[in-house]
């Protein structure tokens, strides 16, 4: 993956408000997965984030990182592969799923793992 692709994914995410980020992630990953990665115990919170309320600052950071990664993977591979990547165990992340690593706030690690996947480097 080129640096341009990562920068483009960042720029596209930055231009979105929290409601739109939540809407896109719910459409691609489902509300339960979005609640998990955001660190919310309320599986219905992502539906509220799509319309009326906004997530906490830390949840918003995780949502934005997830959207950037989603964009990179969907552009570099396809949406089916991107979804599988988010929910499956990942060797670069110590066999944890990216959803759980994001929930822990380890956004940089998830971004690096996505880049390694797209580049085929797989070095931690």
Image (cartoon, rainbow, N blue to C red):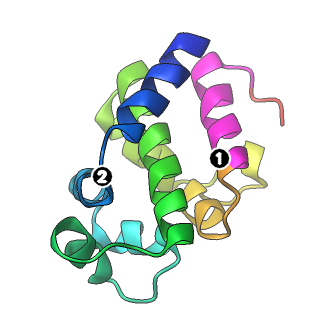
Quadrant where the N terminus is found in the figure: top right
Q: Residues within 10 Å of mark 2 (few under 14, many from 20)?
A: few
Examine the image and state in which quarter residue 106 appears.
bottom right
Is residue 72 visible to us here? Answer: no
Residue located 29% across and 73% down the image: 46
Rendered location of residue 73, percent (x, y): 44, 31
Residue 14 placement (x, y as % from top left): 41, 39
The location of residue 25, given as percent across then percent down, is 31, 54
Q: Main secondary structure of the magenta part?
A: helix
The residue labelled by disc 1 is 110
Q: Residue furthest left?
A: 51
Residue behind mark 2:
17
Left or right: residue 46 versus residue 64 is left
In the displayed structure, does residue 1 sit left or right of residue 12?
Answer: right
Q: Is disc 1 surrounded by few (<14), some (14 to 19) or many (20+) residues within 10 Å?
A: many
Where disc 2 sits, the SS reads loop
Q: Residue at x 33, y 28 (%)?
A: 78
The structure residue drawn at horizontal position 63% and vertical position 28%, both measured from the top left corner, is: 115
In this picture, is 29 found above or below 53? Answer: above
The residues colored magenta run: 108-121
Q: Is residue 53 visible?
A: yes
User: Does 115 sit left or right of 122 as displayed?
Assistant: left
Of tags 2 and 1, which is closer to the observer?
Answer: 2
Q: Is residue 81 left or right of 85 when viewed as pictured? A: left
Q: CA distance from mark 2 to mark 1?
A: 21 Å
Give the position of the C terminus as an image quadrant. Answer: top right
Q: Residue 112 lies in what quarter of the image?
A: top right
């Amino acid at each position: 993956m080129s640096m341009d692709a990562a920068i483009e994914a960042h720029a596209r995410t930055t231009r979105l408000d929290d409601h739109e980020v939540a809407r896109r992630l719910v459409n691609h990953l489902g509300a339960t997965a979005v609640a998990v990665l955001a660190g919310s115990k309320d599986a219905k919170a992502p539906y509220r984030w799509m319309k009326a309320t906004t997530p906490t600052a830390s949840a918003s950071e995780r949502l934005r990182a997830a959207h950037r990664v989603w964009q990179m993977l969907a552009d570099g591979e396809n949406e089916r592969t991107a979804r599988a990547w988010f929910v499956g165990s990942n060797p670069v992340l110590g066999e944890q799923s990216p959803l759980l690593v994001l929930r822990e706030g380890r956004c940089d690690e998830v971004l690096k793992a996505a880049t390694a996947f797209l580049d085929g480097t797989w070095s931690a």
